[in-house]
Structure formats: C-alpha cells, structure tokens
Amino acid sequence: MAETRVETLKPFQVDIRFATPRITLLTVIALFLTLVGVAAGVWGLLIGHHHICNTTREIPWGILISGYIYFAIMSTGLCILSVLGHLFGGTSLLPLANRALYLSIAAIIAGFTIIGLELESPWRMFWMAITPNPTSNIMWMGALYGACVAFMLLEFSLIISKRYGLAFALGVLGALTEIAANTNLGAVFALISAKPFWYGAQLPIYFICSALMSGAAALIFFNYIAYEVRKQPMDEAMQKATSAAGKVLLLFLVAVSLATIWRFLAIFTGGSDQGRLAAMALLNGPLSFNFWFFEIALGLVLPIVILVLGGLRNIHALFLASLVTLLGAFFQRYDLVVAGQIVHPYYGLFEDIPKYLSYSPSIYEILMIIGGFSLLATAFLLGERYFAGVFESREH
C-alpha cells in the first residue's frame, strides 16, 4: 500500500515520511551546518583567506580544492548513470535515473559552493565570463560545469512537466558536457608540468573512472537511506536497479585500483625525481596513513571484498560498500591534491631546504567542507520530501 502511495504522489506533494519531526530536525541541522560553512567562507573574504586557511604560497591548494573535486567528480558519475537509465529505458538502471539526476545537481552545487568560498576574489569570475581566455583550462572548467548545471536543471524541470523527449535530449547534452568538464578538470592538474606527480595523460581518464565509481556509490547510498527512512521494502525493479549500480561500482573500483597501480609504476620507472619523492610521501611519508588506510584499504580493497563476498543482490552489503567507497574517495582527492604540492620546489638546490612541506586544514577550512556535505544532505532530505513522486515514477 505504501509503495503505491509514493508512486501516485505529485511532484511537489509532501511525502509525510520525510516530513516527520525527526527528519525535519535533521534537515534544519543540515541547513544550519551549511550556513555555518558559508559564514566561515564569507568571514575569510572579509578578513583575508591567509588569516583563516592554512594554505601557503608553496601549497596554495588545500582541502577545499579536494572537496570541490570530490563533489564535481561525484556529480559527473551521477549524471552519466542518469542518462544511461533514461537513454536506454529498458536497462535496469531506469528506476534510479531521476534520483541520480537530482543528486547530480545537488552535488555540483555543493562543489560550486566550496570553490566559491575557496576563491579569494570570487567576483573576478564575472570578468572571466565576459573576457574569456580559450587557452585556460580553468576557464573551460567553469564554462562547462556551468553549462551542464543549466542542462540538468532544465532536464529535471521537463521531467516534472512530463516532456520526456526534450528532457532526454538535454540529458544527453548534460552528460556529454559533464564528461568534457570532468576530463578538463583532470587536465587542470595533468597539464601543470611544474608538478611532476600530476603531469601526464592519465589523470583525465582516471577522473572519469573515479566519477563512475563515486556516482554509483552515492546513488546506492542515498537510495538505501530513502527506503530505510520510509521503512518501505524495495520492489523488484528497484532491487535490480540497485544491483546494477553495484555492478558499476565494482567494475570501476577495480578500474581505479588498476589505474592507481599503473600510475605509481609509471612514476617509478620513468618519472622525475620530484615525482618519485611525491609518490614516496604517499607510500611511506607524511601521507602514508591516509594513503594505505583510507585510500587503499578503506576506499578500494574493502568495498571490493564486500561486493564480492556479500553478493551484489544484498542491499545491506551494497550500502556498506558504498559508504566506505565514498569515505575513501574523499581521501583519494585529498591525497592527490596535497601530494602534488608537498615536495619543496627547491629541495636539493639549497641547504636546509626540507624535503616535504607541511599542510593541515584549519578549522575554518573544515567548517567549509562540512558545509558542502551538509548542503548535499539538505538537498537530499528536501528532495525526498517534495520529489518522491518523481524519483519513484516509472512512467518515462
């Protein structure tokens, strides 16, 4: 009976199971934490980022850049999975397509919020928009991600109004733009020849594999929570869809693992001395615990083991695998950003120059990251309250 009622909900009709006092309180708390994170960033704009952030001239990119990459990559994966469900309507992913689209929009907005707070002069983006530099990867990153947000918002609006043909056409454009933006984001790092740990052709492809891994994990994670809150068992189609997302997750966990192995092999067989020093910072240096415990054991090995042993039809095992994948993926982004800058640029040229620079995020940076996660949580809770009928619809 409950399942039928969700499918007949109108797009803006409140689902009372996500409007209980407990869920409302959680929504208010998530919104409050979002505002706290935004307030921390605005405070930095007023007094200067150098007063609130632990980034330096030598390490100008910190955890905020990691957070932006995390959400941007997640958004790309969710968008691709949404289009796969919509474009090939007979696939198992179809029941998850609308929720994936909504979460993709929420994730990229969370990423935009973090990068907006990270910039010392965000208003200069206006001048970048009216005086674009076609040779700048960062200019293209902003333009492409801005375009894909517009495409996805229009697509979601058209799905609500049941204009599916035009919606799916925009969805394909949005996915293609997301892929272009994602690979361009990888190129922002990969084309910096002064940072040997980043430099090379692998990162754009690595980012796409990471996108599908993170997107599948996020979709399983939030879909599971939606049904648990409603205390509603998944129907057969939704179970098959979740299992299909689990297969995508397993496939790209393996792909990211292989890409990680080959990246280190390439660095140690043909890379520069600074590239090898950066790699050693991950293997047995200041970032080694992050790398071995969070990135490798928690983010790659454990979810693969859970999915292989727990089975792809076990919803609880899929949820656990998605949870540890999302946690490990954040440290993958953090390690990538910091390791590329941690080797002192003048090490070996002068005496008394340390091999590695130090960086740890400040409380303000952590508050801004929490604000980004809280924004995504707020969007999810509000979406399940008001768009349950859209998420559960099979009409298209």
Image (spheres, rainbow, N blue to C red):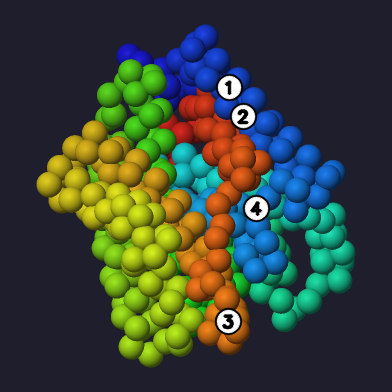
Q: What element carries label 2?
A: helix
Pointer 4: what residue? Answer: 54
Q: State which tag comes first along the sequence, 1 or 4.
A: 1
What distance separates the C-alpha of mark 3 from that of mark 2? 46 Å
Badge nearest the viewer, 1 or 4? 4
Q: Is mark 1 on a helix, strand or loop?
A: helix
Q: In the displayed structure, does residue 318 sit left or right of residue 393?
A: left
The residue lying at 51 percent from left, 53 percent from top is 70
What distance separates the C-alpha of mark 1 from that of mark 4? 27 Å
On screen, 60 above or below 16? below
Q: What element carries label 3?
A: loop
Q: State which tag comes first along the sequence, 4 or 3.
A: 4
Q: What residue type is labelled 2?
A: Leu
Mark 4: few/some/many CA within 10 Å (<14, 14-19, 20+): many
Circle 4/circle 2 CB separation < 8 Å: no
Circle 2/circle 1 CB separation < 8 Å: yes
The answer to whether residue 318 of the structure is visible from this angle is: yes
The residue lying at 68 percent from left, 31 percent from top is 36
Identify the mark at residue 351; answer none if there is no mark: 3
Q: State which tag comes first along the sequence, 1 or 3.
A: 1
What distance separates the C-alpha of mark 4 from that of mark 2? 21 Å
Q: In the displayed structure, does residue 108 sit left or right of residue 238?
A: right
Query: In terms of image quadrants, where is residue 25?
Result: top right
Badge nearest the viewer, 4 or 2? 4
Pointer 1: what residue? Answer: 29
